[in-house]
Image: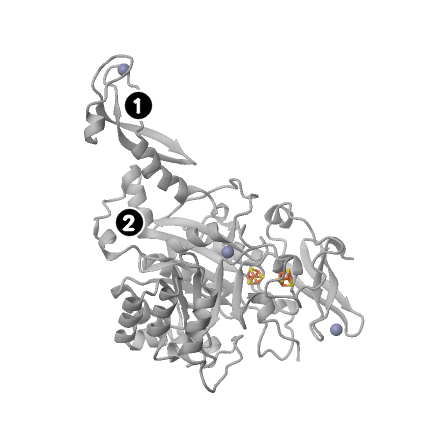
Amino acid sequence: MREIIRKTYSVCPVCLKRIPAVHAAEGKTVYLEKTCPEHGNFSAVIWRGLRDLEAWRGNLPEIAEGENENCPHACGLCPEHRQGTCCVLLEVTKRCNLNCAFCFAEGGSGEDIPFAALQRQLHDLAEPGKTLVQLSGGEPTVRDDLPRIVAAAKEAGCRYVQLNTNGIRLAADKEYVRALAKAGLSFVFMQFDGTRDPIYRTLRGRGLFDIKKQAIENCAQHNLGVTLVPTIVPGVNTGDIGNIIRFAVAHSPAVRGVHFQPVSYFGRFPSLPSDSRRFTLDELLLAIEDQAGELVPGDSLHPSRCDHPLCGFHGDYLVMQDQTLHPLHKGQSNCCEPVTAEQNRNFVARRWQRPDAEDAKEPAVGDDIETLEGFLRRICSHSFTVTAMAFQDAGNLDLERLRTCSLHVYSDGRFVPFCAYYLTKQA
Amino acid sequence: MTEKERKWKCGKCSQVLTLQKVVFDYLGHTFSHEVPACPKCGQVFISKELAEGRIAELEEELEDK
Ligand code: SF4
Ligand code: SF4
Ligand SMILES: [Zn+2]
Ligand SMILES: [Zn+2]
Ligand SMILES: [Zn+2]
């Protein structure tokens, strides 16, 4: 017997109509359950009971009667949306130089959007001095004019320009990396699914580990911080989570952190997965503690407050000289205060970006973080973050989460919450 | 110490302040920092520059997000 512990709304995975949904508990495991009058019953695991769900979520309100009735079909942003734009994602191409099993960006081909059109969009989306724009795809580095696009983003007033990439071109083309850095690129988010080639062969179709290392090295030469982005897939790389964290720490300060993304099923998937093919946020929390607890103690990871707590988490650290992590926030300090998208953006971007070569030249004296000066210097040079985002798909979409989403895709002049933008029907 | 701080005196003891290492706790972290203090009574003086500079920076970094 399953017990209903929360009410929310979702969509039918077949017709995408908004329908009521519940969180139903069976023992400690929690499922999102829903029924479409036309297409029947659906269930997807959302929590394995490895952490206390209520404590993790805090006292957020459910979607009340009459709220968000047009969700997610009024997206981009409607007046009922509850969070501002923390990061805005701009697709600069549909093309890619890989053929991944788990790609959501409908591997496309054909003409790229012309530079002038992108320049106009950057101008329209930017709030001068504030915006964090993610250049994404497809694989953005297939464009030779990407440095020009970066420069256009800076000219439009974007404060931070992030590149989402698989790293292949960054590894192969040092001149390209130099041009990106010179154009004002702030930092790089690089796919990094593990520390062994078989993982890449399964997920990405070829061994890429050496390429990833080369890309990190090339970025380091131009002071570009790299955050590693593993897609975590059951049966493929769930056992490599600790190794990924250790690799990242060992490559600090060039590597600025790890951003975990449990696999989600949008895009080309023919059907929704069984629960065994999902990796819930609490499974990820436990895996990190089990595999790398000496670096990342469980109580140093906190639920997202910018987004919904079930969307992700974050932890902030200093990397010490002996390659240990010193957590900046332990315990549950004032974790219930929501933060604005802007506060969050500035906080995280400061850590993902490396300080100017000038500032970094200051010798980071020993481990003198006991002094105020030493501590501030080390934060500037050796920050490290562990973050996660559990993207939603048609199977587990929870509109209570979606309505507070701060990651928005810019498209046709609108800011569309990421998980609404990429939502796809089951075939 | 800044030029200005160099001339400060303790209001109570009229002693010229000297730089002394103090240890303080802030949001769960312990730091030491050299600040002007009275050599006689030990009273510590936090300048506006320090409060608005380094300490504000620290607050920004340690505030939980
Ligand atoms: S997700 Fe946000 S923007 Fe989209 S329909 Fe719901 S409230 Fe509106
Ligand atoms: S992108 Fe999806 S998972 Fe991330 S905050 Fe938005 S709704 Fe949540
Ligand atoms: Zn339906
Ligand atoms: Zn955010
Ligand atoms: Zn005195």
- The outermost residue toward the bottom is A110
| Residue A277 image position (x, y, % from top left) | 60, 69
Considering depth in this image, is A205 or B55 the residue closer to the camera?
B55
Mark 1 burial class by Cα count in 10 Å: few <14, some 14-19, many 20+: some
Indicate yes or no: mark 2 CB to ligand 4 under 8 Å.
no
**Disc 2 residue type?**
Gln
Q: How many marks?
A: 2
Residue B44 is marked as 1
Mark 2 burial class by Cα count in 10 Å: few <14, some 14-19, many 20+: few
Could you say whether the residue bearing mark 1 is in a helix, strand or loop? Answer: loop
Task: Determine whether, in the image, residue A147 is placed left or right of residue A13.
Answer: left
| Residue A204 image position (x, y, % from top left) | 45, 77
| Residue A206 image position (x, y, % from top left) | 41, 80
Image-quadrant location for residue A219:
bottom left
The correct choice, above or below, for A177 with respect to A61 in the image is: below
Measured Cα–Cα span from mark 2 to mark 1: 32 Å
Residue A228 visible at all? yes
Circle 2 residue: A321
On-image quarter of the N terminus of chain A: bottom right
Considering depth in this image, is A93 or A199 the residue closer to the camera?
A93
Residue A193 visible at all? no
The correct choice, above or below, for A301 with respect to A20 in the image is: above
